[in-house]
Image: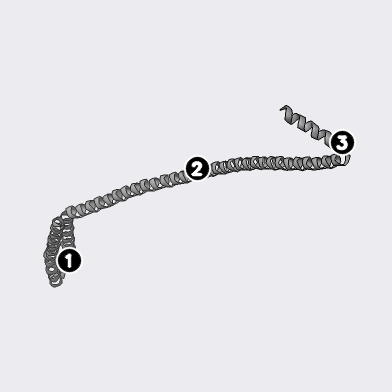
């Protein structure tokens, strides 16, 4: 801020000096023109022209020497400011490119992680499917074995019942045949044999 105020002060001084120089140079010119009108025939064109050229040379030289340093300094400051802006923009560009590269890498990493997660879920799904199939097979085998045991048990029970019924029917049939064929003599003989066994025991 202080440097800017010093620069402004210098510019005002230069401007005031140039204005003073212009006024200083303009006064002889006006005086020479008045003198030229009064003595136009005596001095002629060369004297007036020389006076104007001298005024212009002095004014141009003064302006050159006065404005050379401030102008070159202003141009230098402007160039430095532009260079700083360019450097700042270049640094921002590099930072933005770096950040963009980081984001691109993160996106690529996220894509890779997403692929890995999908592959992991697929693998877990295949394992769960295989496990469910194995468990279903084991359960089916157990059910089949249980059904076989139940069938064997039912068949054994039915066979035993059937055998018992057959035996009962056979005994009844045999008894009825014996009753038909047995005479009184056979009955007496059986009673005697039974009594003999009881006495012997």
In the rendered structure, find residue 101 and report the number of the disc placed on it. Answer: none
Task: Please identify the quarter of the rendering in which residue 44 is found.
Answer: bottom left
Asked if residue 53 lies left or right of residue 192, the reply is: left
Q: Are marks 3 and 1 in contact (CB under 8 Å)?
A: no
Q: Are marks 1 and 2 in contact (CB under 8 Å)?
A: no
- 176 above or below 49? above
Image spot of residue 105 (x, y percent) = 41, 44
In the rendered structure, find residue 44 and report the number of the disc placed on it. Answer: 1
Instruction: Measure how far apart labels 2 and 3 are at the Cα level.
Output: 97 Å
Name which residue lies at 14% across and 55% down: 3
How busy is the neighbourhood of tag 1: few (under 14 within 10 Å), some, or many (20 plus)?
A: few
- Which residue has dot 2 on it? 120
- Looking at the image, which is closer to me, 80 or 98? 98
Instruction: Measure how far apart labels 3 and 1 are at the Cα level.
Output: 204 Å
* On-image quarter of the C terminus: top right
Scheme by which the image is coloured: one colour
Closer to the observer: label 1 or label 2? 2
* On-image quarter of the N terminus: bottom left
- Which residue has dot 3 on it? 185
């Amino acid at each position: 801020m202080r440097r800017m105020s010093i620069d402004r002060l210098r510019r005002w001084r230069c401007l005031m000096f140039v204005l003073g120089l212009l006024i200083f140079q303009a006064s002889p010119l006006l005086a020479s023109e008045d003198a030229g009108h009064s003595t136009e025939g005596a001095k002629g064109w060369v004297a007036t022209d020389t006076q104007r050229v001298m005024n212009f040379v002095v004014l141009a030289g003064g302006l050159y020497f006065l404005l050379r340093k401030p102008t070159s300094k202003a141009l230098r400051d402007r160039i430095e400011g532009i260079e700083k802006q360019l450097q700042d923009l270049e640094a921002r560009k590099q930072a933005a490119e770096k950040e963009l590269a980081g984001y691109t890498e993160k996106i690529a990493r996220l894509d890779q992680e997403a692929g890995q997660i999908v592959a992991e879920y697929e693998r877990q799904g295949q394992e769960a499917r295989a496990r469910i199939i194995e468990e279903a097979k084991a359960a089916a085998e157990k059910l089949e074995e249980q059904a076989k045991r139940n069938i064997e048990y039912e068949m054994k029970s039915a066979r035993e019942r059937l055998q018992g019924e057959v035996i009962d029917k056979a005994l009844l049939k045999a008894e009825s045949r014996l009753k038909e064929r047995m005479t009184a003599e056979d009955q007496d003989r059986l009673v005697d044999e039974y009594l003999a066994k009881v006495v012997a025991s």
